[in-house]
Amino acid sequence: MIAVVTIFILAIFVGLEVISKVPMTLHTPLMSATNAIHGVVLVGGILVLGQAHSVGGIVIGVLAVLFGTLNVVGGFVVTDRMLEMFKSKRGKR
């Protein structure tokens, strides 16, 4: 158990270090790739939820699918807002 917690904490530090080094111009493609990965995770969660037989498994599966859906939708909203910054205004032409 201590090894798993240690790996989790180290993964947090490595993730923060990697994300802090990403240039601003790459955030939109990075978000798009992350949304695709979360979509695959969401499909996997739905498939696992379909095989759950206990009440605890169903509750955890529903929560996982709910949070996965919120993550995917939120990621697409953020990506869309970022892409809107690069569109030209019609009134300025």
Image (spheres, helix red, strand yellow):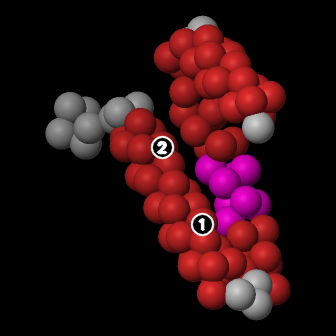
Looking at the rendering, the stretch of residues picked out in magenta corresponds to 35-42
22 vs 32: above or below: above
Is residue 37 part of the magenta span, yes or no?
Answer: yes
Is residue 50 placed above or below 5 in the rendered structure? below
Which percent across, then down, holds residue 77? 41, 52
Along the line of sight, the residue nearer the viewer: 27 or 6:
6
Number of callouts: 2
- Which amino acid type corresponds to the residue marked 2 in the rendered image? Thr
In the current view of this chain or complex, which residue is farthest to the front? 1
- Give the residue pinned by disc 1: 64
Q: Main secondary structure of the magenta part?
A: helix
Q: Is residue 86 visible?
A: yes
- First reached walking from the N terminus: tag 2 or tag 1: 1
Residue 47 location, quadrant: bottom right
Residue 64 is drawn in which quadrant? bottom right
Q: Is residue 81 left or right of residue 3?
A: left
Residue 14 among those drawn in magenta: no
Asked whether, in this view, residue 77 is left or right of residue 15, the answer is: left
Taking the spot 57% from the left edge, 79% from the top edge, the residue there is: 59
61 lies left or right of 1: left
Give the image location of residue 48, x and y in percent: 78, 76
Callout 1 amino acid:
Ala
| In the image, residue 5 above or below residue 52 | above
